[in-house]
Amino acid sequence: MQECVVVTLFRVQDVGWTREVKLFGILSLACNEVTMVKQVCIIGAGPSGLASIKCCLDEGLEPTCFEMGDDIGGLWKYRDEVMEGQGNIYLSLVTNTSKEMMCFSDFPMPAHFPVFMRHTVLFQYFHLYANKFQLTKYIRLKTKVKSVTKQTDFPSSGQWNIMIVDENGKEEKLVFDAVMFCSGLQMNPHLPLKSFPGIEHFRGRYLHSHDYKKPQEFQGQRVLVIGASNSGVDVAVGVSDLASQVYLSTRSGVWIFDPLADNGHPLDMALLSRWFFKKLYWCSWEAKKAEQKLNKRFDHANFGLQCKYGCLSRQGTINNHLPYRIISGSVIVKSNVESFTETGALFEDGTSVENLDAVIFATGYSQNYPTVEADGSLSMDARDRRFIFKNVFLPELSKPTLALIGKVEPIGPTPPVSEIQARWACRVFKGLTSLPDQVCMMEEVKKNEISWEKLSQNGQRHPYEVSFIDYMDDVANQIGVKPNLLRLSLRDPALACSVFFGPCTPYQYRLQGPGRWEEAAQAIRTQWDRTLTPTRTRVLPHSETTTNRRATTDFFFKFAFLVLLAGLGVLYYL
Ligand SMILES: Cc1cc2nc3c(=O)[nH]c(=O)nc-3n(C[C@H](O)[C@H](O)[C@H](O)COP(=O)(O)OP(=O)(O)OC[C@H]3O[C@@H](n4cnc5c(N)ncnc54)[C@H](O)[C@@H]3O)c2cc1C
Ligand SMILES: *[C@@H]1O[C@H](CO)[C@@H](O)[C@H](O)[C@H]1NC(C)=O
């Protein structure tokens, strides 16, 4: 630190600006106070960990990332065997968010990558990212972080003791100025066996969807899948290819979204726009309209799926195969299970199924959030997410040197959310952005808890679910990178239109402020090209027709937007 001041002074003196020397000296001394954080420990090299390393480097911090697995990419690294205490995926997994929405904000996916990617393709993207920004040299593979404890002088230093253990069982103790927890969210399967009386007598096999790998395991079997969430439906559809019969039990029904919206555009690019969310907020009929549309494709009541919640009030299920599996009889929808027998299951509606070979519980995950114990050690026992400030900082710590990254489930893509959290955390570590005082943080946290309680009573929200655009904007506001639409529409009206009416792609958060990326605007202009390129694989003589149609509607919107702006301007000056 001292060195840093001296160097600054000298540099300025060389140039001969004596007056500025004093100023710089004072400034650097002031910075000295807040730029104490240098060495950052990052736990996990999944998407969240990779983004965190990159953000540390961008801010001049020195990251060291520990990954217990033998590769980067987190749960997107497919393994045939089930990894306990880690996220797992199955062989047939395809992303349910599109490539333009789920990329990092300064690294668009290659144009030829498909829009919805098989896990192998997404895994490849994370390797491309790590190579491009040379992140691998900061990662220690096959090294597990065993414990995290406050340093004894934490109140003044904010430092942490980290205990790591390598593949040979050798332990090592290290000290870090800050810690970023990027250990994933879907690793502790929630198996509520108590709610399923009789399961202990069931003679078939039962497992959690976390442990499901491929349909071959269930060839010719009669299988019951419990839960119609994204993973439940995906597993039911996958297993039904080879099983003799699949039953899908759902307690409250579910809305099924087609990943392809109008014109075959990706669903998330159609729904996750600022314009659509404004409409939802101001026009109560928009949500009803969306439900009518979903029922127009297939009537959810006739398919046994009718849901008691609004289609946009909680996470729906994105799957285009289920209706066809239902109509062809390979998946039969049932109500909630009341109890199990030795060979079958009884349902709440009084029906039953017999001769079941296997039951797969797609009952989600229980979340472990760290709690700081009285002795200063961090325990990973379940803690209420709602007591975490904006899902990132623990309000009770006197120094904000610990951040949780990616411990949130956005209704939308995850990687850009982790990335913006990491950008915020790094700026807080450096003291360039400050957090509100502890009392204010607790107040906000408590306020959220009250509104969450209300929502969860209506059964509308999981505790860790957040709305994608709202959350991104909220965190972006902390570091001044939320796009300023008014300023943008004066400088580049066409771009402002894309930002407002188009999909809220992550590039929007690189248009201005710290971490601005020169090519962000261009990335937004070309986002539809990268979306359409991978499927335009057969050259057609009239292939320009669809583009033209889009261009026309785009033009209409832009025009309307300009008229509105002009109107506002006139009103302002009157
Ligand atoms: C079946 C499934 C499908 C999904 N589909 C999508 C999708 O389509 N789109 C989307 O945006 N998101 C999807 N997700 C969400 C997914 O969680 C995120 O995309 C992303 O993987 C989160 O990254 P992460 O780095 O936070 O966690 P993870 O990918 O889980 O990575 C965490 C890493 O931390 C390591 N680690 C943990 N503890 C330690 C320790 N103590 N020491 C050292 N290393 C440790 C683990 O080994 C792992 O490599 C899906 C999730 C699941 C389970
Ligand atoms: C995509 O699927 C995963 C896991 O099955 C789920 O957690 C996530 O919420 C889904 N995303 C959306 C946008 O539905």
Image (cartoon, helix red, strand yellow):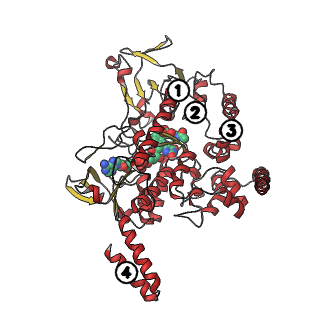
Mark 4 falls on what kind of element? helix
Q: Are marks 1 and 2 in contact (CB under 8 Å)?
A: yes
> Which of pointers 1 and 2 indicates the residue nearer the eye?
1
Secondary element at image label 1: loop
Q: Mark 2 or mark 3: which is in front?
A: 3
Residue under pointer 2: 313
Image spot of residue 487 (x, y percent): 67, 60
- Mark 2 and mark 3 lie on one chain; the one further toward the N terminus is 3
- Badge 1 vs badge 4, beta-carbon distance below 8 Å: no
Image location of residue 256, percent across then percent down: 59, 32
Q: Residue flagged by tag 1: what amino acid is it?
A: Asn
Q: Is residue 339 above or below residue 262?
A: above
Task: Work out whether mark 4 precedes mark 3 in sequence or the reverse, and give the earlier one.
Answer: 4
Query: What is the C-alpha distance between the residues marked 3 and 1?
Result: 21 Å
Q: Amino acid at mark 3?
A: Trp
Residue holding disc 3: 282
Q: Nearer the viewer, residue 27 or 309?
A: 27
Mark 1, other Cα within 10 Å: few <14 / some 14–19 / many ≥20 = few
Decide if ligand 2 comes within 8 Å of the CB at mark 3: no
The reply to whether the C-beta atoms of the residues labelled 4 and 2 are less than 8 Å apart is no
Q: Is residue 541 left or right of residue 133?
A: right
Amino acid under label 4? Val
Tag 1 residue: 458
Q: What amino acid type is highlighted by mark number 2?
A: Ser
Q: Is mark 1 within 8 Å of ligand 2?
A: no
Residue 393, relative to residue 341: is it above or below? below
Residue 124 vs residue 272: left or right? left
Residue of label 4? 7
The Cα atoms of the two marked residues, 4 and 2, are separated by 56 Å
State how far apart marks 2 and 3 are (Cα). Answer: 15 Å
